Amino acid sequence: GKEWTKVGELTESLKDQEVLIRGRVHTTRPVSSKLTFVVLRQSGFTVQCVVSQKPDSVTKQMVKFVSSLNRESFVDIVGIVSVPGVSIKGASQQVEVQVRKLYCISKAVPNLPINIEDAARSEIEIEKALQEGEQLVRVNQDTRLNYRVLDFRTPANQAIFRIQSWVGAIFREFLLAEDFVEIHTPKLIGGSSEGGSAVFKLDYKGQPACLAQSPQLHKQMSICGDFRRVFEIGPVFRAEDSYTHRHLCEFTGLDVEMEINKHYSEVMDIVGRLFVTIFDKLNEKCKKELEAVGKQYPFEPLKYNKDTLRLKFEEGVQMLKEAGVEVDPLGDLNTESERKLGQLVSEKYGTDFYILHYYPSNVRPFYTMISHENPLYSNSFDVFIRGEEIISGAQRVHVPEVLEERAQACGIDVKTISTYIDSFRYGAPPHGGFGVGLERVIMLFCGLNNIRKTSLFPRDPLRIAP
Ligand code: 4AD
């Protein structure tokens, strides 16, 4: 059989050649009973196809049939590539296909709940169209999510999930090259791994259990098992109560855990180098995708330095204070002060990506190592993009007695994590690690305003479908 050509690969170099292409009917524009245009779309790329009775390459019935095809129907086309003298509006490819044969593979219903063209427009384009009196329905987020398979078909969404795929690939490639082992920890566990109430409880054959809030306990136990350096890409479950732009009930966690020789800065070194590599490679490999996202959702490219900035929590508090924002020096920063600090850091140091470390002890989870220099502080850090958290990490307690004490103090029933605590009784190295929220990385790298845009099928407090 004949080879298939991708719509995105239709260029002038194929002039006069016969091609076989597949795609969806993006739009049809009947001109007369003898001529109709159909724009074919495949993975966000579009090409104008000409169905013309002249020079009698197709029948009159064929022109009629094509004119009546519903949008989004799937078709196969055999045609000849031609180069029109004028630029083609409404198609990404600047060549046309003169249709010889057209087969409808799958018909779409006539009234789609989402019009893909409308769903792909930027806010500016919508405003302009409305001013010009165009009939247009703004596609709201819930409609998009309800009909996600249609919503996926816009160029921006095609790009977002390709970028997401690259982040996972670059993360894995970087860590494998640094001698990390990829692990897969259980998602059904006996107790909460992060403390607190945000757990999905379930019945495990008559025993109480829950969905893992993180791979925290098991990634540390892997370190106790001599793997030295591990990472995981997997689902994380949080029974969030609040409905926000950045919280999901299920997200993808990129987790890392490693032995530490001397200082928790070794973990921050990995964070810095890993993320500079991710950003560099995205800018290199995803140019088209970043452009497609920016076309619908304009954003400033991320500013970052080769050496990742590290600020101590105290310094952050000081910067905020100087800017007139008072925060508790031994408390946590709220969303608003994190944003503000992000702005201040961006102005002062010219980066949208930085690490804030040496956090107050009492705002960190029970497994966090308290500083030997000053017990009010801990060997822990958060990482921010554009003033929003994407990572938290720390050195961990590896002394079982201390761990037990800390868990109790944090109100955790130590019976539910006894096997975890016991792991440290057989000899355990100093270690630390961090957890990244994948959806947040893409959201903030692309300056998007809602995490639902970067989650394939988001789960939030109000949504478990589709
Ligand atoms: O800050 P978190 O809760 O830290 C942990 O889970 C630790 N076990 C990590 C470690 O190794 N010390 O979650 C880590 C990251 C956050 O920085 C955030 O990016 C993301 O996971 N995250 C969420 N993303 C989406 N929806 C939610 N509800 C999230 N909660 C945390």
Image (cartoon, grey):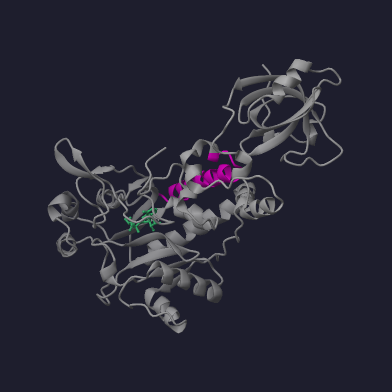
Residue placed at 39% from the left, 48% from the top? Answer: 251
Q: Is residue 409 left or right of residue 378?
A: left
Residue 429 placement: quadrant? bottom left
Q: Is residue 52 left or right of residue 243?
A: right
Q: Is residue 98 left or right of residue 354?
A: right
**On the rendered image, what quadrant is the C terminus found in?**
top left
Q: Quadrant of ligand 1?
A: bottom left
- The answer, for residue 145, to whether it is visible in the render is yes
Residue 360 placement: quadrant? bottom left
The answer to whether 374 is drawn above or below residue 391 in the figure is below
- The answer, for residue 101, to whether it is visible in the render is no
* x and y, in percent, of residue 51 in the image: 77, 24
- Is 455 covered by the magenta stretch? no
Front-most of residues 110 and 170 = 110
- Is 178 covered by the magenta stretch? yes
Front-most of residues 383 and 208 = 208
In this picture, which residue range is highlighted in magenta? 151-179
* x and y, in percent, of residue 101 in the image: 73, 18
Residue 391 placement: quadrant? bottom left
- What is the count of numbered marks? 0
* x and y, in percent, of residue 384 in the image: 45, 64
Residue placed at 64% from the left, 51% from the top? Answer: 126
**On the rendered image, what quadrant is the N terminus found in?**
top right
* x and y, in percent, of residue 423 in the image: 19, 51
The answer to whether 417 is drawn above or below residue 109 in the figure is below
Q: Mostly what secondary structure, the magenta segment?
A: helix
The answer to whether 316 is drawn above or below residue 106 in the figure is below
Q: Is residue 105 left or right of residue 37?
A: left
Front-most of residues 425 and 191 = 191
The answer to whether 195 is drawn above or below residue 98 in the figure is below
